[in-house]
Every structure is written in structure tokens, then in C-alpha cells.
Amino acid sequence: MKLLYDYSGDFDPSFDHGRLSKEGLVGLLHTYSDYIRRLDGHWYLSVMNRCGNDAAFACDTEVWERLVLYELKIASELLNIRGDDAVAVAKVFQVSPWFWMYKCDLDLKSRDHLIITYRDCPTLLALEREGAGRERQICVDLEMKIFMKMAHFYNPKMKVTALKLPPRKSADDVCCRWEFKIEENK
Amino acid sequence: MKEPLFDYGGDFDSSFDQSQLSKEGLVGLLAAYSNYIRKLDGHWYLSAMDKCGNDVAYDCDIDVWNKLMKFELKVASDMMNICGDGVASVAKYFQVSPWFWTFKPRLKLKGEDRLEVTFDKCPTLLALEKEGLGREAQICQIMEPELFETIAHHFNPKMKVAALTLPPRKNIDDVCCQWEFKIESER
């Protein structure tokens, strides 16, 4: 871990995070993102160990159907990301704490058409290492539900299609690829 | 939520990254993600409780936080250079922790070896009081002392933690809880 702020001196009762440099704050934001991923992962595994994967997956789905709404609220209200097109979705991906943990390419083909490609995904890597095939649920079923919620938050007519999904044949393959599209009314 | 921290209402910027936010914006976003962490934990607990019962959810909570606390302490030590074996390190940890950000505890250093931490506000306790099942007896009286001991012992294995005030509260204006971190001088 990289040193972001040297707080090795005396205790300062008036300390707040504004003391950090911009670079330090961005570094801390990334650490918080990792924190969120770890917290979620530990909860999943802990419930799975005690009650089985079906219960853990049901919890995970329930949790993220709620949390994604909070994430969208942050995007809309704190960062003024609004609109009813694929541009808004592209922006939400950029500001999401999850996005920072993954290597993603956003290809905005037009205002109504976005393709997102995940090149690196620590969750998929962990699932592949585990070898229990859980990526079929997490990456296919859950991810689709979350992405649909995101799309429909901005435009109920936006469609989400998985273009490429795990399981992967090779570790060099992309992790997954999705399309967000608003079809023109015919 | 009030004023936007950053106005990303215009065109899509393929080169966007968080460093485009002002310092104030970044601090605001950190605060929002601190809240995100608390919400995520709370939703997982309630969902596990709903599906597997409170005993399982509570065991999971302990399991999760025993692991997460180590990560959080590592962040404090490695990224903010909070080291040292005095109670001041614990006070600093409370200031920088994303988890405790939303709680804003009052920190009172009483000499070099004694710290008093007072939680005037606690969204977790408020939710537990509203729920009315008495789960604060577990969360605040059993789990929290264990976690605080982990924090104390990370910096100094001889540091003691004592609860000075604990829920249940008699009155909504009472403090939520109050703790003492102390290093007894060797005789």
C-alpha cells in the first residue's frame, strides 16, 4: 500500500480528510472501493459457508438490487449524472466505486448505444480459482439484473444484452462484454 | 443529498477520472462511500437474518469484521502512517476509518495513556432501536467490545478497552455509547 498522508506526528483533534492532497484523496477513494468489494465478498463467503450457496446468492441478489439504487442516487445527486440515454450509463460506470477495481473499456457508439468490456475482474479471477462454477450465477444472472436496473433507472426502454460471458476458455480472453442499447421506435 | 460535488451533466468524457473533482468534491465522495460501506454491511446482515436467522447473521458479521478490521488497520498504518503504541494511534485510527466516518465519535485524549471515545450519533443503534428486537444487546455489548479490543491490540497488546456507557438507552438524547482505551502503567 502506498503512503497517502503522513499522520505519524501528534494527534490532531481537528483532523479531517481535507488535509490529504488530491492525489491522496483519489488513492483513498480507490481503497474504499476495494473495501466495498472485500466487504461484499466476505459476507457472501461467510453466508455460503454456513447456509449454502443458494442462500448466499439470494442474499447477494437482494442486497445489490437495493445498493445499486444508492449508487445511482450518488451518481445523480452528487455528480449530476442524469438523462435518458446510454451516455448516462457510461458516466455511471466511470464514477462507480466498483468500476475502479476492474479494467473496463467503454465504447460509446452513439448516444443510444454503449458497449462495455471488462478486461480484468478480480471477482471472476477469484471464482475461477475457486472452481465451483459460481461465475454462471454471479456473472450471468446477478450481473444482468443489476445492469437492467441501471439501464431502466435512466430509460425503461433501454435493453441490456450480454455479448460475451464467462466461463472463459483462456485467461487472456476478456472477462465479459455488455451492450446497452435504446432501439429506435419503429 | 444537496449540492452536486461535481457537475458531470455535460458530454461523456472518455478520459474522466476522479482527479477532475475538487478536493472538497473528493472528500464529499469519500463520505458518500463511507455511507455506502455501512449500508452494504447492514443490508447483508438483514438479508442473512431474514433467510438464515439472527444467530447465523450474527456469526457471519463477526467473521466478516474480524477479517475486514485487519484490512482497515492495515490501511491506517500503511497509507496514513499511523503507527506507535499509544492511545493516540487509536484516536487517529477513529478519525481516518471509513467505517467510523459516519459516526463522528468525540475523541478525548486524557493524557498519554487514556482515550475516551463517545458516540453521540449512531445510525446502526437508531435502526436497532427502531426495529425493537433488542439486537443492540449483541451488536453493541458483545461484538463492539471485541472489535475495539482488536483495534487496541493492533497498536499495543497491553491496551485495555472498557465500555463506560452502553445501550439500551433510557432516553433518545443520551449518548449512544462511550468507551475508554487505556494503558495501565506497569508497577
Image (cartoon, coloured by chain):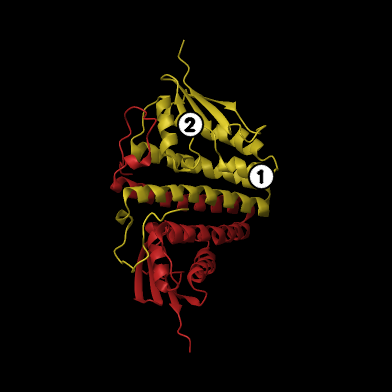
Chain colours: A red, B yellow
Q: Residue at x 40, y 51 (%)?
A: B29
Callout 2 secondary element? strand
Q: Could you tell me the amino acid type at mark 1?
A: Lys
Q: Is residue B72 above or below residue B26?
A: above
Report whether residue A170 is seen: no
Callout 1 secondary element? helix
Which of A117 and B100 lies nearest the eye of the viewer? B100
Q: Residue at x 53, y 57 (%)?
A: A67
Which of A15 and B47 lies nearest the eye of the viewer? A15
Left or right, A171 with reference to B162: left
Please tell me how crowded label 1 is: few (under 14), some (14-19), or many (20+) other residues with Cα within 10 Å.
few
Which chain does the residue under circle 2 lie in?
A: B
Report whether residue B152 is seen: yes
Residue receiving disc 1: B130
Please tell me how crowded label 2 is: few (under 14), some (14-19), or many (20+) other residues with Cα within 10 Å.
some
Same chain for mark 1 and mark 2? The answer is yes
Q: Position of residue A12 (x, y in %)?
A: 36, 30
Q: Residue at x 61, y 42 (%)?
A: B126
Image quarter of residue B83: top left
Which chain does the residue under circle 1 lie in?
A: B
Residue receiving disc 2: B106
Q: Could you tell me the amino acid type at mark 2?
A: Arg
Left or right, B82 with reference to B121: left
Q: CA distance from mark 1 to mark 2?
A: 24 Å
Q: Position of residue B112 (x, y in %)?
A: 41, 20
Q: Position of residue B118 (x, y in %)?
A: 52, 30
